[in-house]
Image: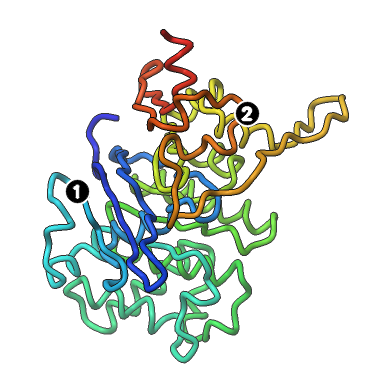
């Protein structure tokens, strides 16, 4: 992935609680190229949202601690910035759409007030100019500017999400992080939001990290795929490489869980047995080993290394190493 806007290198995050240490992110590494969308895929608890919060500098400390790694935005390490310097990036250069639009908006302020506040914070404009820009942003996401004076409770779930997208894009950020923006919406509204985001991506050429657990959504919007399991990247590559040749048993299992509407056979869907490991007690070797039907002895004791398959396609799996060897 050349000409990277964002480079995450060897990132590790843990939460130190009274019950023990939760290892949320474990040596995560991936890049976001300029003008491209990277789909971050994984089960609930895989560490996707924690990764997003690390980029935004919003890991609560305590109990969260970034123990290693770097997050380079245009070559500058965000983890070394002071809070005041980070505020110049957060919202202005890096925008974020949070997971639940119902709780992302302040119920006691109008949506116009909330969007214009973001604009005034990061741009040298008057209150009237910020208000006019807020109206422009609403119209871009398909909401009449007359609704600037409405409160969040006066909008449907899909409309709230459009407001959140307008807010995230209001300062024309170079990077947009969308944390499962369609999860709480019905299928029809999901499709509308995805079409909206694809159109905005084409219009503004904004680099995007799209966090989701749905492979169908990734296929619809992403250029690259990063598969995350137990806080680690286990497979990544272009959308064509990963979807046409899924190589890690976990990725293959995710595809096996999808129904094939074109198949005439009434075969049962495959199921990935077991559940995600406890982040307070991760396996010693491969984190997926206890759930893997093709696990070998080495998987129980040694963590697999990265293997480049072809082009930009990478996988971390002893099984693939064994086949190659």
Residue bearing the label numbered 1? 70
Residue under the point 23% across and 55% down: 67
Question: From the viewer's perspective, is 167 left or right of 70?
Answer: right
Q: Is residue 110 above or below residue 194?
A: below
Residue at the top extreme? 325
For the point 19% across and 47% down, the residue is 72
Q: How many marks?
A: 2
Q: Is residue 176 above or below residue 60?
A: above
Left or right relative to 195: residue 67: left
Crowd tier of the residue under label 1, counting other residues whose Cα lies within 10 Å: few below 14, some 14–19, many 20 or above: many
Query: Few, some or many C-alpha atoms within 10 Å of disc 2 (few <14, some 14-19, many ≥20)?
Result: few
Q: Secondary structure at mark 2?
A: loop
| Mark number displayed over residue 255 | none
Q: Quadrant of residue 3?
A: top left
Residue 21 visible in this rendered orientation of the protein: yes
Residue at screen point 59% across, 29% down: 252
Disc 1 or 2, which lies upstream in sequence?
1
**As displayed, is residue 251 above or below residue 229?**
above
Quadrant into which the C terminus falls: top left
Which of the two residues, 240 or 232, is positioned nearer the viewer here?
A: 232
Q: Indicate whether 115 appears above or below 36.
A: below
Residue 38 position in % (x across, y down): 41, 41
Give the camera-side residue of 118 and 260. Answer: 260
Q: Position of residue 81 (x, y in %)?
A: 12, 62
Q: Nearer the viewer, residue 297 or 207?
A: 297
Q: Which mark is residue 293?
A: 2
């Amino acid at each position: 992935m050349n000409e990277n806007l964002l480079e995450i290198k060897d990132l590790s995050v843990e939460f130190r609680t009274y019950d023990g240490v939760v290892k949320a992110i474990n040596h995560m590494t991936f890049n976001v190229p300029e003008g491209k969308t990277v789909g971050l895929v994984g089960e609930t608890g895989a560490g996707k949202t924690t990764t997003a919060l690390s980029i935004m500098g919003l890991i609560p400390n305590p109990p969260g601690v970034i123990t290693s790694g770097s997050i380079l935005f245009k070559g500058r390490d965000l983890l070394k910035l002071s809070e005041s310097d980070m505020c110049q990036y957060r919202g202005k250069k890096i925008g974020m759409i949070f997971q639940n639009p119902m709780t992302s908006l302040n119920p006691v302020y109008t949506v116009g007030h909330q969007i214009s506040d973001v604009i005034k914070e990061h741009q040298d404009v008057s209150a009237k100019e910020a208000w006019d820009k807020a109206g422009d942003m609403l119209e871009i996401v398909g909401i009449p500017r007359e609704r600037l004076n409405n409160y969040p409770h006066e909008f449907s779930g899909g409309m709230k999400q459009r407001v959140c997208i307008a807010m995230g894009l209001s300062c024309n950020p170079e990077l947009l992080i969308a944390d499962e923006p369609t999860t709480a919406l019905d299928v029809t509204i999901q499709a509308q939001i995805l079409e909206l985001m694809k159109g905005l991506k084409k219009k503004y050429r904004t680099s995007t990290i799209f966090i989701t657990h749905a492979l169908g959504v990734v296929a619809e919007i992403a250029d690259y795929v990063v598969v995350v399991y137990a806080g680690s990247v286990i497979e990544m590559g272009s959308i064509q490489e990963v979807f046409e040749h899924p190589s890690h048993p976990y990725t293959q299992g995710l595809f096996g869980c999808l129904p094939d509407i074109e198949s005439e056979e009434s075969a049962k869907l495959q199921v990935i047995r077991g559940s995600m490991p406890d982040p307070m007690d991760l396996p010693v070797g491969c984190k997926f080993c206890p759930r893997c039907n093709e696990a070998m002895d080495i998987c129980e004791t040694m963590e697999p290394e990265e293997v480049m398959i072809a082009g930009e396609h990478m996988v971390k799996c002893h099984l693939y190493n064994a086949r190659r060897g």
